[in-house]
Image (cartoon, coloured by chain):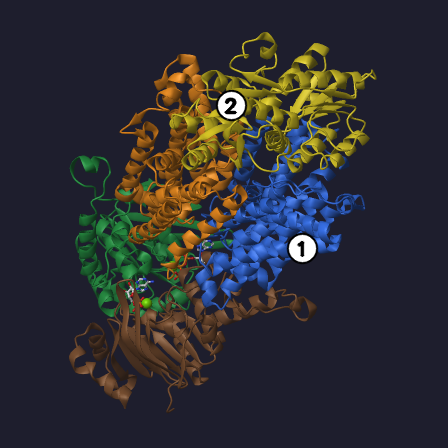
Chain colours: A brown, B green, C orange, D blue, E yellow
Amino acid sequence: MAVPLIDARGIVKSYGQVEALRGADFSLRAGEVVALIGDNGAGKSTLAKILSGVERPDSGTIELDGAAVAFGAVEEARRAGIETVYQDLALCADLSPAANFFLGRERLKPGLLGLLGVLDNTTMRKETRQACERLGVRLASQSAPVSTLSGGQRQGVAVARAVTWARRVVFMDEPTAALGVVQTRRVLDLIRTVRDSGVSVVLISHNMQDVMAVSDRVEVLRLGRRVARFETARASMEELVGAMTGALEQQLESEPRQERDA
Amino acid sequence: MAVPLIDARGIVKSYGQVEALRGADFSLRAGEVVALIGDNGAGKSTLAKILSGVERPDSGTIELDGAAVAFGAVEEARRAGIETVYQDLALCADLSPAANFFLGRERLKPGLLGLLGVLDNTTMRKETRQACERLGVRLASQSAPVSTLSGGQRQGVAVARAVTWARRVVFMDEPTAALGVVQTRRVLDLIRTVRDSGVSVVLISHNMQDVMAVSDRVEVLRLGRRVARFETARASMEELVGAMTGALEQQLESEPRQERDA
Amino acid sequence: MRELGRLQVVWIGLVLAGLLVAFAVLAPRSFPTSFNLLNLVSDAAILLLLATGMTFVIITAGIDLSVGGVLVFSAVVAAKVIEGTGSLVLGAVGALVTGLAWGVVNGVLVALGRIPALIVTLGTLGMSLGGALLLTGGVDLRAPAELNLGLGLDRWLGVPQIVWICAAITAVLALALARTRFGRHTYAIGSNAEAARRGGVAVRRHLIKVYGLAGLLAGLAGHLSLAKYGITGVSAHSTDNLQAIAAVVIGGTSLFGGAGTVAGTVIGVFIPVVLQNGFQILGVRPFWQQVVVGAVLVAAVYVDQWRRRARDR
Amino acid sequence: MRELGRLQVVWIGLVLAGLLVAFAVLAPRSFPTSFNLLNLVSDAAILLLLATGMTFVIITAGIDLSVGGVLVFSAVVAAKVIEGTGSLVLGAVGALVTGLAWGVVNGVLVALGRIPALIVTLGTLGMSLGGALLLTGGVDLRAPAELNLGLGLDRWLGVPQIVWICAAITAVLALALARTRFGRHTYAIGSNAEAARRGGVAVRRHLIKVYGLAGLLAGLAGHLSLAKYGITGVSAHSTDNLQAIAAVVIGGTSLFGGAGTVAGTVIGVFIPVVLQNGFQILGVRPFWQQVVVGAVLVAAVYVDQWRRRARDR
Amino acid sequence: GQGGEAGGDGQIRITLVQGLAGEEFYETMACGARAKAKELGVTLDVQGPQKFDPTLQTPIVNSVVASKPSAMLIAPTDVKAMIAPLTQAKQQDIKIILVDTVVEDQSIGLSRISTDNLKGGAAAAKALSEQVGGKGKVLVISTDPGVSTVDARIKGFEEEVKANHRGIAYLGVQYSHNDVTEASKIVNAALAKDSDLAGVFATNLNSATGAGSALQQAGKLGQVKMVGFDAGPAQVKQLKDGVVQALIAQLPGDIGAKGVEQAVAAVRGQQVTPSIPTDATIVTAQNVDQPEVQKVLYKAGC
Ligand SMILES: Nc1ncnc2c1ncn2[C@@H]1O[C@H](COP(=O)(O)OP(=O)(O)OP(=O)(O)O)[C@@H](O)[C@H]1O
Ligand SMILES: Nc1ncnc2c1ncn2[C@@H]1O[C@H](COP(=O)(O)OP(=O)(O)OP(=O)(O)O)[C@@H](O)[C@H]1O
Ligand SMILES: [Mg+2]
Ligand SMILES: [Mg+2]
C-alpha cells in the first residue's frame, strides 16, 4: 500500500496553442476505485490517454509500482496490465464485435492451423457474446460490423473488452454515457467485482450519483490541473461539484499538494 | 391541441436481418417535452432519424399537423422546422465549430460579396461562441477543427446548433451523455426555455432523473415497439424502468393502443 | 483544418523555395533567368488548371481520372468547331461546354449512381479518349493558325496570355474554396458526407457541381492546349490525371478528403516541374533524372510532414 | 463487413458471368473455346498477382503506384542475375528479393515517415523505373531461352504453369486475408488505424509487411513476366498500377480501407480482360472498344452497387 | 460485328494487328490495307494495343487467333517476345504476314514487308546535319525508352552522326513520355542550358509538337532546326509552318496495301513474295509539293 500503483506528477500536454494539461498529478493504489472528475475540457480524457500510453506527455513523470516509466507505445501499457475504455470508444467500425473484442489478442485455431495464424472465429464469437451478455448488452448479429450497432451496444463492447483483459488497471472514460439503466447498473456492479478481484479502476464520469456509488476516492481536475482529492465516504456531492466548477477552488488548491507530499 | 404536431404510426425499419423498428408509434403535441426512453438497441435513435428525415421507413405513416408527409430528404424536415441532435453528433470533424454550427445555413457578407457567396466568418464565429457559452461550453480556439475538441465540447456544439435553428421540434438523442454537471443542468434549463417558446422537444435519454425533471410525457420503446406512455407527473421512476425492461410489459402492452385509438 | 492547411502551405512552400535557391546556386547562369522561369511557368500553366479542379474533387474525397481524356476530347471538339464555323469564340465555347458535359456525367454517376469515383472516371477516361480517337480517326487535328499564333503566342506584359488566364482562374478558385459557401460545402462533404447531408447541404447537387467544375477546367485546358501546341494531342495526355493528383497531394490535400488548399496545389504543381527543369539544366542524365526526381519528391513531402507529426491521417 | 463483402462478390460475380454468357452467345465458335479462355486466363494471371497485393494495401487505406516499376526493376534484376550466374533459380530469388526490398522501402516510408502512400509510391515508381533504365541502358533485356521456353511455356494438365503459380498464390492470400490474424489486422488498420494502435496492433510493423508483400508479389510478377514474354518490358508497365487499382475497386474494395476481398479482386481483374477479349473477337474497332469497355465497366459496377444502395461509403 | 463468325464459307477475313492503335503511321497503314481489301473484296478487321509493347499485343493476338481469321497482318512489337503467340497462330492455320517490323524466327511470316527504322534514323541525321550546316549542338527527343522502333531510329541517328558528321555535338536523348508538355519542358530547359542549340531530332509527332511549341515561345523557330519522323498531315502542316525543316517519311499506306495483297495470295494458295523492303524518304519544304513526294505522305481519314 505504501507505493502507489500509478503515480503521475506534473504532467503537461499541449496541442498547438491549447494546453490540455498544465502540470496535472494523479495517483492510484492497487485495488481501489478512483473517480476522475472535472468539467468539460478539463483534461480528463487527455490524462487517461497519457496514462494508457496512447499519447506522450510533453513533460512530467509517471511511476508504475514506484519505477519510472516512459510509456512510448500502447503495447507497454498493455503489457503492464492496463486497459482502457476510451471516450471515443476506439473500435474498428468495419469489424465485427468479436473481432474488436479480440483485437490484438486474436484466438488462433489449435495445432498447425494456429501456427499459420488461422483465427478461431467460433470461440471468439462465443466468448464475446458471453462477455457482452454479462453487461446486459444483446447483439442482434454476431457478424454484423460494429458500425451497425446502436450507441449503447458499442459502448457495451468496449467496456466488456477492457474489463476482460485488464490485469492491473482499467481506465473507463465515461463508460456508461450511452448505456441504458440496467446496463449502467451492471457496469457499476462490474466495477466493484473488478476491484474485488484486485484490479484498480479509474472511472471518469459526469454522473455524480455513479461516482458516489462506486468510488473509494475522487480526484478533481480543473483546467488541466488536479485541484482536489476526496475520500468518497467523507465528501458530499456539493463539494464535488464545487471543486469541479471552481466555486471551492480557494480552500482546496493547496490541499492536494500537502497530501501528496505527505 | 386536437391534432398532434407529429403522429407516426406503425413505423417499420429493418437493416438487413435486424429489425430495428417493428411497428413503432409516436406522437408529439405542440409545445410539449416528450421523453423517448428504452433499453439499448430498442430503436430510439432509429425512430429519431426517421422522424428527422435522415432515414426512410420501410412502412408506416407519418403525419405532420395532420397531413401525411413522406420525408424523403433532411431538407424537408428542416423546412418543417425540425432539428436534431444526433447520438453520433454528425459534425464535420475537419471543420471549425462555427462552420459546423452554420452548416447549410452559412451567413454571407452583405452586398456584392454576399451575392458571390463569400462567407461572413467573423459573424458566424461570434454567434457560435455566444450560443456555446449559453450552455457553459468554452471553446479554447474558434478556428481549431472539431476533431480537436473534447467529447463534451463537441456535444455542446451539436446541442447549441439544433436549439438555435429549431422552429417547431428539436429531437435530442442523448444530448447530455458527454456533458459535465453544469452543462447538463444548463441543457435541461434550455429545454424548458425552448418549450416555453413553443418549440416541442423530444428528449432521448437514459438518465431517469433528467427525464423526470423536464419531460411532460414519456413514451417507452421496447424491441422496436411503443410499449407504454406516461404522463410524467403521474409516473414513478420504477414504472419507467419496469416498462423499459419489460418487467411491466404485460399490463401495459394494451394501454397505449387504447390511448392512441381514443 | 484551414488553419492547419495554411501552416502546411508555408512549409511545402519553403521546400519549393529551397529547391529554387539550390538550382539558382548550382546553375546561376541558366536556371534563374527570366527566360527559363517564364518558360517553366508557361509549361505548367495548363496542368495547373487540371490540378485546381482536381483539388476540389479530392477535397470531397473523390478522384477524377478522366481529366486527360476530357482535355483531349474538348480540344478535338474545339478544333472541329473552328474548322466547321471558322469562329474561334465558338470553338472555345464548344470546348468549355464539352468539358462541362463530361464533368457533369462524372458527377451524376458518382452522386446519383453511387459508383466509386475511381471507376466512374476510369470509365469516362476510356470513353472520352476513345471518343476523341473516333472523331479524329486517330489522326491529330491541327489548330488554325489564328488560334495557334494568336492566343497561343500572345503576351501581355511579357507574360503569355495563357499564363494570365490560368493564373487568374486559379486565384479565383482559390478564393472560392477558402472563402465562399461553395468551398465550405466542398470541405464539409469530404469531411463527413453524412453529416453534411444531415446538416442540409445538398450533397448530390454539390458533387455534380464539383465534378462539373473539374470537367469545365479540363475543357478550358483542352482549348488552351490546342492554342499553345497547335494540335489536339490525342495520344499525349494519358498521364495528366496522375500528374494532377500528385500535385494536389504534394500540396497537402488529403486523399481522404476534408482538407486541402489551392495554394498548396500550386506549389505541388511546381515542385516536380522545377525539379525536372533544374536537373536537366544541371545535365543530369535522363534515367537518373527519374530516380532523383522520385527521391526528392518523397524527401520534400517528408520535410513537410515532419512538421506535423502529431496529426494522424 | 466481411459478410457484406461476401454478398457483394456474389453480385459482381454475376455481372462477370453475364458478360461471359453474352460473349459466348454472340461468338459461339470463337469465344467459349478452351483455347481462347485459357489464353485469357494466362494473360490475366500476372496482373492478378499485382492486384492481389494491391488489395491488401488498399484495405489498409493505402495505395501502391509503384507496382509496375518494381515489376520491371525485378525483371531486370532477374535477367541480369541469370545472365551473370546462369542459374534460373538465382534469377527468381533475385527478382523476389528485389521486389520485397522495394516493398519494404515503401512500407517504411509510409509507416515510419508518415508520408502519404500516394507520394511515397509515386516516388518509388520513378526511382524503380529510372533504376531499371539505368541498369539496362534503356534497352529491353531478353530472357534466356531456358526460362522463356521453360517456365514461360510449360503446361501442367494443359494449363500453363504460370497460371497455376498465380492461382495458387492468390488462393493462399485470399485465405490469409479472410481467415488469419494477418488479414484481421489488415482490415483493422484500414478501418481505424488509431483504434488498431490502441488495441495493441503493431500498426507500423504491419504496414511494412503489407507493402512488403505487395512488393514481393510485384517481384514475382516481374520474374513471371520475364519468363512469359521473354523481355523485361521497360516501357510496358506504366499503367499496371491503375489496372491493378481498378481491378481491386471493381471487386468491391473501398479506397477508404477496411473492406474488401481477394475474391472480388479476382473478378475485378477478369471483367476488363473479358470485355476486351470479347470485343476484339467480335471485331469491334479499337477506338470503339475503349468507349464500350469504359461504359460497360461503369455499368457493371453500377449493377453491383445498385443492390446495396443503403450503405453509405 | 458479324464478321467474327462468318469465316469458313469462302469469304476471306483478314485482321491487321497494329503496333500501336491510334498512331498516324499505323492508321495510315490501316487505311491502305482497307482500300486494298475493298478492292479485292475481302473483309478486314483492325486491332491494336494502346502501347507499342509485346505484353499488351500478346492478348490481342490471342483474341484474334481465337476469332480464326484466314490471315493476320501484324507489326510485331518485339522480335522475340511475339514469337510464342505467333507460333500459336501459325498452328491454328492462320496465314501470317509481317508488316513494318519482324520477329527473329525466320519461319514466321510468309511475307515480310518491313521498314528499316535504323535507316530512317540515319536519314534523319543526314537531313539535320544538312539543315544546321554540319556543325552545332543537336538534341534528340524521344517518347519512352524501350520502344524498339523508336530506339532503332535513335540508334541509326547516333551511328550516322558519329560516323559521318564530325562537326556535330550530340547532346544525347531526352524522353518526353509521349507528352507534348514534357517535350516542351525539355526543349525549354535545353535552351536555358545551351542557348546555342542548333538542331533537334524529334522521333515522333508529340515530341515534335512540344518542341516546336517551346521554340515558338522562345522565338527560335527556324533558327533551331528540327527534323521530325513520319509524314502525316499534322507533320506536313508543321513542315509547311516552318516548325520542322525536314521529315522522314516511310510508306505505311503502301505497306498495308501490299500486306493485304500478300495475305490474299497466301490464302488463295498463290505465290507470295517472302521479303519486300521499303525505303525512307526525306521530305523538306522544297520538295514537299513534288508529285513523287506527295505520294509518300501519309493519308489520314480514309
Ligand atoms: N445502420 C444500421 N445497420 C444495421 N443495423 C442497425 C443500423 N442502425 C441500427 N441498427 C440496429 O437497430 C437496432 C436499434 O438501434 P438504435 O440505434 O435505434 O437503438 P437505440 O434505441 O438508439 O439504442 P441506444 O440506447 O444504445 O442508443 C440495434 O439492434 C442496431 O444494431
Ligand atoms: N488532439 C487534440 N488537438 C487539439 N486540442 C485537443 C486535442 N485533444 C484535446 N484537446 C483539447 O484539450 C482540452 C482537454 O480535452 P479533454 O478531451 O482531455 O477534456 P475532457 O476533460 O475529457 O472533457 P470532456 O468531459 O468534455 O470529455 C480541450 O480543450 C480540447 O479541446
Ligand atoms: Mg473526455
Ligand atoms: Mg441510440
Q: Is mark 2 on a helix, strand or loop?
A: loop
Q: In which quarter of the image is ligand 2?
A: bottom left
Residue shown at 80% from the left, 43% from the top: D158
Question: Badge 2: how crowded within 10 Å, few (<14), some, or many (20+)?
Answer: few
User: Where residue E197 appears, x then y in whole percent?
Assistant: 46, 31
As drawn, E163 above or below B140: above
The residue indicated by pointer 2 is E133
* Numbered circle sitting on residue D94: 1
As drawn, C71 above or below B209: above
- Is residue C91 visible in this depiction of the protein? no
Q: Is mark 1 on a helix, strand or loop?
A: helix
Q: What residue type is labelled 1?
A: Gly
Q: Please tell me which residue lies in front, C160 or C111.
A: C160
Q: In this view, does C236 lie to the left or right of D73?
A: left
The nearer-to-camera label among 1 and 2 is: 2
User: Where residue C308 appears, x then y in whole percent?
Assistant: 36, 59
Q: Which residue is at the far top?
A: E291
User: Where residue E273 appears, x then y in whole percent?
Assistant: 79, 18
